[in-house]
Image (tube, rainbow, N blue to C red):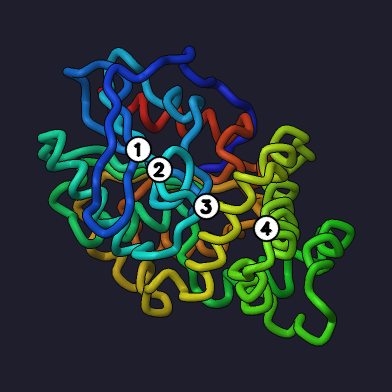
Amino acid sequence: MTASIAPTASLYPPIEPFRTGVLETGDGHEIYWELCGNPAGKPAVFLHGGPGAGCSPDHRRLFDPERYCVLLFDQRGCGRSRPSASLDNNTTWHLVADIERLRKLLGVERWLVFGGSWGSTLALAYAQTHTARVSELVVRGIFTLRRAELLWYYQEGASWLFPELWEGFVAPIPPAERGDLMAAYRQRLLSQDSAEQLEAARAWSLWEGQTLTLLPDAASAAKHGGDDFALAFSRIENHYFVHAGWLEEGQLIRDAGKLAGIPGIIVQGRYDVCTPAKTAWELHRAWPQAEFHVVADAGHAYNEPGILSQLIAATDRFAR
């Protein structure tokens, strides 16, 4: 285990995809994907967070464009994938299957898998299912959808650290329904009343957007407050969380031994309120072969300086 404060690396320069496409899933979804970097470079796949957040241009910049060929894609129902905010045929295992279909479509034998937050959940699920297809695994802000993790952030726990923001989160829910906030939100996020749905979506999305970082980040809050983003993000997140990601309780920690032969790096912000360090520590204990880096002056977001430095160092190292 290492702890770090001083950042030593930053994002690579902006880059555009050299190839884009749409994967027709056959069950109602169109998955947008793109390839960036060097077509002859080391294969990698980037798994975004949320679920429901989509990819951003800055995610391309986590990899040396001279040494990597990186696939990025917007998971079902979000970003540039269609239909937007759709919950039909949208589960963890649909996404794991989508990753495999994209790997085969591109003719990749093995690739580095990179995921943060919900992306770490999906990366672990994929790597434990298709171990032979993973050359290395880089995960950040570890989240495994155990009941205690969900209750910490959406029922009681994080609320003690951000009481003024929590008031905004619970505002759309009458006091009588606050004993199960995820269920109460589900009722409103599936409502036929578009105004009620949007009010709930914005409150859910802003709660996360305002608590991601160690220090306040106005840009994150603004992004999460946008109507289109908030609807996809909140509906998909809530859908996954109410169903515990279609995972058995504790499954991803329990099955971490399957990763023993995969070189790995775990990066965790010490003051991560969204996905507290306890889960990352338990993953490290279950997968001791992976390096474990705690960033002493960071919260949850990938672009906080110390976390970003560790992530760039990880992709640079595996490129060699």
Q: Is residue 148 left or right of residue 156?
A: left
Q: Amino acid at mark 4?
A: Ala
Residue found at x 30% / y 64%: 93
* Crowding at mark 2 (Cα within 10 Å: few <14, some 14-19, many 20+): many
Residue found at x 24% / y 46%: 24
Foreground of the two, 293 or 275: 275
Distance of label 3 from label 1 (alpha carbons): 16 Å
Label 3 vs label 2, nearer the camera: 2
Where's the C terminus, which quadrant?
Answer: top left
Name the residue carrying label 4: 201
Name the residue carrying label 3: 50
Q: Is residue 52 left or right of residue 298?
A: left
Q: Is residue 296 left or right of residue 81?
A: right
Mark 2 or mark 1: whose residue is earlier in sequence: 1
Foreground of the two, 3 or 162: 162
Q: Amino acid at mark 3?
A: Gly
Name the residue carrying label 2: 81
Mark 4 or mark 2: whose residue is earlier in sequence: 2
* Crowding at mark 3 (Cα within 10 Å: few <14, some 14-19, many 20+): many
Mark 3 or mark 4: whose residue is earlier in sequence: 3
Q: Is residue 56 above or below residue 320?
A: below
Foreground of the two, 72 or 303: 72
Distance of label 2 from label 1 (alpha carbons): 5 Å
Mark 3 or mark 1: whose residue is earlier in sequence: 1
Q: Amino acid at mark 1?
A: Tyr
Contact (CB < 8 A) between labels 2 and 1?
Answer: yes
Distance of label 3 from label 2 (alpha carbons): 14 Å
Distance of label 3 from label 4 (alpha carbons): 13 Å
Residue 175 placement (x, y as % from top left) = 84, 81
Name the residue carrying label 1: 32
Residue found at x 52% / y 69%: 241
